[in-house]
Amino acid sequence: MNTKQCEVVIIGGGISGLCVAHWLTKRNVDVIVLEKDAAVGGTMKSVSENGFLVETGPNNALETTPLFKELVSDCALEDEFMYANPASANRYILRDGKLQALPLNPIAFLKTNLFSVSGKLRLLKEPFIGKAEREESIAEFVTRRLGKEFLEYAIDPFVAGVFAGKPEALSVHAAFPKLYALEEKYGGLIKGMIRGGKVRKARAEKAKDRAESFSFRSGMQVLPQAIAARLGDKVIANATVISLQTTSQSGHQLSDKRFLIEYSRNGAAEQVIANTVVLSVPAYAAAELIRQYSPTTAATLDSIYYPPVASVYAGFEQKAIDQSLDGFGFLIPTKERRKILGCLWSSSLFSGRAPQGMVSFTALIGGSRQPDLALLDEETLCDVVLTDLKNIMQIKGKHVYLKVTRWKQAIPQYELGYHHKIKALNQFEMEHPGLFFCSNFKGGISVGDCVKSAHETAEIIGAAISLSQ
């Protein structure tokens, strides 16, 4: 059996795992990345067909951290990097069957028909509301501080767009820690947004509502592909990990215990021995690998809910669309009783997403709101999505291109009590030196969150290795 040795093995070649490997390699740490698929990127895949560019995972990222520019520079992606079209700044919310622009400044807020006069006046109470005395769901938090109408027509659709989740189920502490921190640290949201801006500026970070959206000319998959190209033969594709065990060997730097990872590749069994293992896989996959070490922690990972989500990418002739496509797209509140969660106007966001004279949209369906819809047969699924799209956007013609992508387990839900799960995972890491979790079930689900978590993990591992030398 072929046996390799290295300092750190990263299981999972999505953006988290690749970024850990990238920053460790910059510190001259010997790494190996094991990726079960033929291509890296995890859900971050880009498909080019018939002149359309389809994102089967994240359609874009927000430049919330300077680490993105570091990655772009390291991977020589300056010519590929692109910000979203400035004309796509508008975000629309469906209310009473009509698309209303989400106000982006105080004057627009005063003029908007998205919120009633009473809903607007309710926000004036926010600075005078005290702190919560228990853990709250996002719905409870927002209703208490901002009122029910703001929950229904701003936060509910936003939660569906980001988490494909329900605000009644998600923990504000776990799912939106920065929002929660505004109340904890500053006593309120308005006070915190003003004072917290100074802190973010000192860290060279941007709030998500102000960070610019970006992608790459050839699609988001360009980023993981470029990182993998720099890593070269340190990335082993088509490698399905079978087991993770502890073994004993002498002559290495950290201790007399090392990790033995067995995997299959192209039908052959192989193995690698390392001092440190980073699990950059979904929670349910990580559970199987660590079950022998801690059945309790594995059960915690098993309990993390990933609802099913489906994406329908649709291309139309531009002349078939009566709706002005001057925005990012739209989100749909639960109260509107539609089937889809929302829709990105893909070709408005970034150039090169549709052929000349064509437009493209990416509609999402399912999630925690209506999980069964994501599991419909493809023909029914497309009919449901297209019916909503045509009704909302006044589409008259027939589509010229259609592509469906499904995730049976899509986005981890940071539900009430999630901080207890994170505490258990942190405790496991402390009790099992050399084992780390670095995936979107820990530290945030956005691309920016994953990049920052990966950098933090690499720094911790790199520092430990330096101390042992």
Image (cartoon, rainbow, N blue to C red):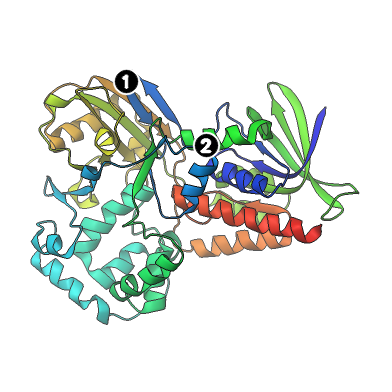
Along the horizontal axis of the image, is 294 left or right of 72? Answer: right
Q: Residue 460, position in %: x, y?
A: 66, 58
Q: Residue at image x 38%, y 71%? A: 198
10 Å neighbourhood of mark 2: few (<14), some, or many (≥20)? Answer: many
- Residue 62: x percent and y percent? 38, 49
Q: Look at the numbered disc 2 and give the secondary structure of its residue.
A: helix
329 or 282: which is nearer to us?
329
Question: Which residue is situated farthest in the right direction here?
Answer: 250
Residue 235 is tagged as none
- Residues under labels 1 and 2: Cα distance? 22 Å
Number of residues whose C-alpha sits closer than 10 Å to that of mark 1, classed few (under 14), some (14–19) or many (20 or more): few
Identity of the amino acid at label 2? Pro
What residue is pinned by disc 2? 224
Q: Position of residue 313 (x, y in %)?
A: 31, 29
Q: Is residue 409 above or below residue 420?
A: above
Find disc 1 in the rendering and name its residue: 51
Q: Which residue is at 62% across, 55% downward?
A: 457
| Side of 396 where 175 appears, left or right | right
Tag 1 secondary structure: loop
Report the quarter where the C terminus lies. Answer: bottom right
